[in-house]
Image (tube, rainbow, N blue to C red):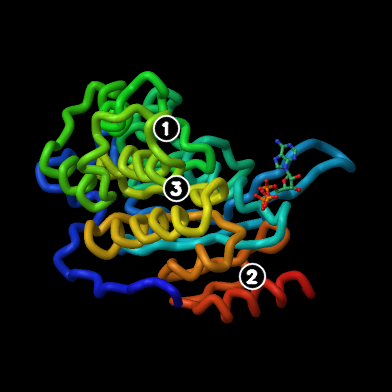
């Protein structure tokens, strides 16, 4: 592995155990999910279309994402990675099955509560940074909380900004930042609410290798040092080698689950998936 792996502090607060935070800002905490997991899915099925043209994008996925872990999801094109992430994050509705995020069953929430959950309990990082061009880096970072009219925890903000290495760039607008810096702003924005889980969809897809290493290093540190939970979809074995765990999807099912794999292990598993 081409990255440092610092030991995870046992004092990391598990998501959902934030000091001073209500148990569930978005709705009733009605389901605990598997113990120690930040997000879980059971029997997740997603079909698109009807009749002969039906596509079964997810074919019965059972998965638990353990708190304070970085999990990568890999698999061939069309294997269901984006669909899984969208169903987990409440951006898409599964045909059947259930999703629990930080103790809340997502499928049972009203639209209003789902929106609140996405703003305050889930962080998103996309391939395109999705920053607001007229706002400074600091304003972009606090935007989800500002929209939700939720208070900014200044100590946590400072910790995240320091971890992401943007302390001297906070007053710059996105056009004054490099791609890697913009993506680090997006990562800080995803973490500012201290979410139960951060979903990152190809977070390094637009970055050169140096900027990719910076962003991946930060995502890993957000887990190891800040106790956050990250689930990342990636096609890149080097990016996946930053993860504590790599899941492989094939035809809408999880077909491999590797703990702390090296890049070689990941390449071998990808080769196997393509032969199947
Ligand atoms: N809105 C949709 N309507 C119809 N079919 C869809 C839709 N979204 C996804 N699919 C189909 O579902 C399957 C899974 O798609 P998905 O985008 O989740 O795969 P993926 O693994 O993320 O692919 P890629 O790596 O190419 O992004 C594919 O067969 C895709 O064509």
Out of 138 and 271, give the one closest to the viewer. Answer: 138
Q: Secondary structure at mark 3?
A: strand
Label 1 – label 2 distance at C-alpha: 30 Å
Residue found 74% across the figure and 39% down from its top: 48
The residue lying at 81 percent from left, 37 percent from top is 50
Of residues 239 and 113, the one nearer the viewer is: 239
Please name the residue shown 57% across and 55% down the image.
43
**The one of 28 and 67 positioned closer to us in this rendering:** 67
Q: State the image coordinates of residue 80 (x, y, percent, origin top left).
A: 66, 52
Whether residue 144 can be seen here: no
Label 2 belongs to which residue? 255
The answer to whether 21 is drawn above or below residue 217 in the figure is: above
Badge number at residue 199: 3
Q: Residue furthest front?
A: 176
Q: Is residue 76 depicted above or below 110 in this figure?
A: below
> Callout 1 environment at 10 Å: few (<14), some (14 to 19), or many (20+)?
some
Real-space Cα separation, disc 3 to disc 1, in angstroms: 19 Å
150 above or below 49? Answer: above
The CA span between labels 3 and 2 is 21 Å
The quadrant of the rendering that contains the N terminus is: bottom left
Q: Position of residue 90 (x, y in %)?
A: 48, 38
Q: Residue 255 location, x and y as percent?
A: 64, 70
Which label sits in the foreground, 1 or 2? 2
């Amino acid at each position: 592995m081409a990255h440092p792996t610092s030991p995870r502090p046992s004092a990391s607060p598990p998501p959902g155990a934030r000091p001073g935070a209500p148990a569930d800002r978005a709705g009733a905490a009605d389901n605990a999910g598997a113990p120690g997991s930040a997000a879980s899915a059971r029997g997740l099925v997603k079909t698109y279309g009807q009749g002969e043209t039906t596509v079964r994008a997810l074919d019965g996925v059972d998965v638990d994402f353990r708190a304070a872990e970085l999990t990568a999801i890999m698999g061939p094109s069309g294997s269901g990675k984006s669909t899984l992430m969208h169903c987990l994050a409440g951006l898409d509705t599964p045909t059947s099955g259930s999703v629990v995020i930080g103790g809340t069953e997502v499928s049972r929430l009203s639209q209003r509560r789902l929106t609140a959950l996405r703003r305050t309990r889930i962080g998103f990082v996309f391939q395109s940074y999705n920053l607001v061009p007229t706002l400074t880096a600091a304003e972009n970072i606090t935007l989800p909380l500002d929209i939700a009219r939720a208070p900014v925890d200044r100590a946590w903000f400072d910790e995240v900004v320091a971890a992401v290495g943007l302390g001297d760039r906070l007053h710059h607008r996105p056009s004054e930042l490099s791609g890697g810096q913009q993506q680090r702003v997006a990562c800080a924005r995803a973490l500012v609410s201290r979410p139960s889980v951060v979903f990152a969809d190809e977070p390094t897809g637009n970055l050169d290798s140096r900027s990719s290493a910076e962003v991946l290093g930060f995502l890993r540190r957000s887990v190891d040092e800040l106790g956050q939970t990250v689930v990342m979809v990636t096609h890149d074995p080097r990016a996946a080698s930053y993860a504590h765990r790599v899941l492989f999807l094939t035809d809408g099912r999880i077909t491999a689950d590797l703990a702390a794999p090296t890049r070689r292990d990941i390449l071998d598993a990808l080769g196997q998936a393509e032969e199947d």
